[in-house]
Amino acid sequence: MGKGFFQVPTAYNEPVLSYAPGSPEREEVLNQYKAFYNDKVDVPLYIGSEEIKTGNTKPMSPPHDHKHIVGHYHLAEKEHVEKAISNGLEARDAWANLTWEQRAAIFLKAAELIAGPYRAKMNAATMIAQSKNIYQAEIDSACEIIDFLRFNVEYMSQIYGEQPESSEGVWNRVEYRPLEGFVYAITPFNFTAIAGNLPASAAMMGNVVVWKPSDSQVYSAKVIVDVFKEAGLPDGVINVVYGDPVMISDTVLSSPDFSGIHFTGSTDVFKSLWKQIGNNIHNYKTYPRIVGETGGKDFIIAHPTAKPQQVATAISRGAFEFQGQKCSAASRVYLPKSSADEILELVKKDIASFNKPGSPEDMSNFINAVIHEGAFDKLAKYIDQAKADDNAEVIAGGNYDKSKGYFIEPTVILTTDPQYKTMYTELFGPVVTIYVYEDKDWSETLKLVDSTSEYGLTGAVLSSDRYSIDEATKALQNCAGNFYINDKPTGAVVGQQPFGGARASGTNDKAGSMQNLLRWVSPRLIKETFVTPEDYRYPFLG
């Protein structure tokens, strides 16, 4: 602690810019997009003070133009991962003992850099690397990561201020120590903000981190590293490696100094890592913190009183924004028979108004490419199966093309079977499955929603009837960590809707809240007695 009790700047949500035609931000991001697109970047490993180029590289290509190469990134060998761990541990003492306001200042500076001179770079890199349209990039790689940094600093100060009561002659105090060892951050391709937050939130609390970004997000991850470096993050605090995920995880999880994992990704991978940690538990100096946000099979259920246009908009936005590649995306929908036809016609009208999927450089495109060929092939298989099955029908979209980019048309499957495969399987693409229920079966359908999926991430109910909203809120309390009333099940805002789910969707440690930061500290209680007893006898002894 410095020589004062400091109040950090009040956190606020970064305003979302419009990027309307003719706006200066639109021109700036397009210019930056073209500059990145026409250049070649060589992305090294970042270990301590070194930028290591192993010579073993992989190309980076935009999903919407997979034959075009925008750069290469270098793959780590086991020795590099071991070096990342040792560099982190070497940096730990100085970083952990740095006064908290100095750590806070680094990440507040990073937020302002992203809000200002790096905004176009962050957005353009995300548009290229992840094929996000400018609005999806803006709310992610600019606003959300800024919000994470600002609000986490505020939460950090609140945590440090949370202190116990003291009795007469005694001073009790709690210090919030960083974990003893290092934290392993594994981040996904779909949100640049998550990629930045998972290592940064642990580092902010005084921890050192080994960070493995997704191979499909290295391009925008590199810009995050640039920001942190300019903000003054000391060498060795966050070490960045790319490459074989099995080798990297095996190396990290075999270290006795492993103290926690901060993960966003697939459920199966997370379960495998959890098992691996359990198998290695006798090797660790401490019990590791395991924090993960994984998959989802997120729902919309509409009550017969719901307004059809509102339901249709929730589907069109919730299912198809960023090509459905959000763990919160609406992918199963339950519609009442009395209004289903009207709702589906409105959804079809929305889809018909979309441009054919294309590049985010064309800002009239609502839909862009899915992330890679593996995702494309998986989605195409499920679409083809729905076309062939008797209990399913593709009523909108259903076409796909990977000749230039990995383009999947927004697709609506209508099924007569509430247990049809795409009603419970996470597809992670612009495909939504609709089941129509009898109006009288509202309560039974709520039970169906609750029991169909192993996941428990997000969900939404739309209704004009408060009794049905109350019923749904109670009936669905365990199948959605983020529950939305009269809205789509996506779009959680830092500081407003802390994000996370239970069941197979993760540990529900709520990114964007104080709860998450508390996982990255180990409290120490200090009791100081001012007048120390000198006689063992208590008064009752006489």
Image: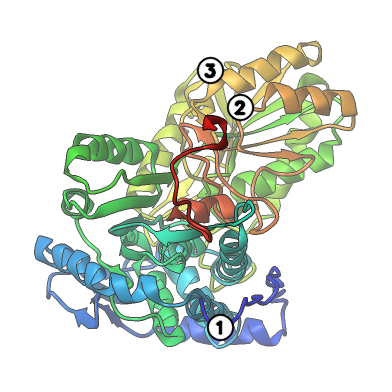
For marks 2 and 3, give the CA distance: 19 Å
Whichever of callouts 2 and 1 sits on the residue coming sooner in the sequence is: 1
For marks 3 and 1, give the CA distance: 62 Å
Q: Is residue 428 above or below residue 533?
A: above
**Residue that mark 2 sits on:** 478
Quadrant (top left/top right/bottom left/bottom right) for the C terminus:
top right
Nearest the eye: 17 or 51? 51
Q: Is residue 525 above or below residue 398?
A: below
Query: Is 50 left or right of 386, judged from the image as shown?
Result: left
Snapshot quadrant of residue 230: bottom left
Label 2 Cα crowd, 10 Å radius (few <14 / some 14-19 / many 20+): some
Snapshot quadrant of residue 168: bottom right
Give the SS element for disc 3.
loop
Q: What amino acid is labelled 1 in the image?
A: Lys
Closer to viewer: mark 3 or mark 1: 1
Q: Residue at x 55, y 79 (%)?
A: 114
Whichever of callouts 3 and 1 sits on the residue coming sooner in the sequence is: 1
Residue 419 - label: 3
**Residue that mark 1 sits on:** 3
Query: Is 370 left or right of 86, judged from the image as shown?
Result: right
Q: Residue at x 48, y 36 (%)?
A: 505
Give the SS element for disc 2.
loop
Residue 376 - label: none
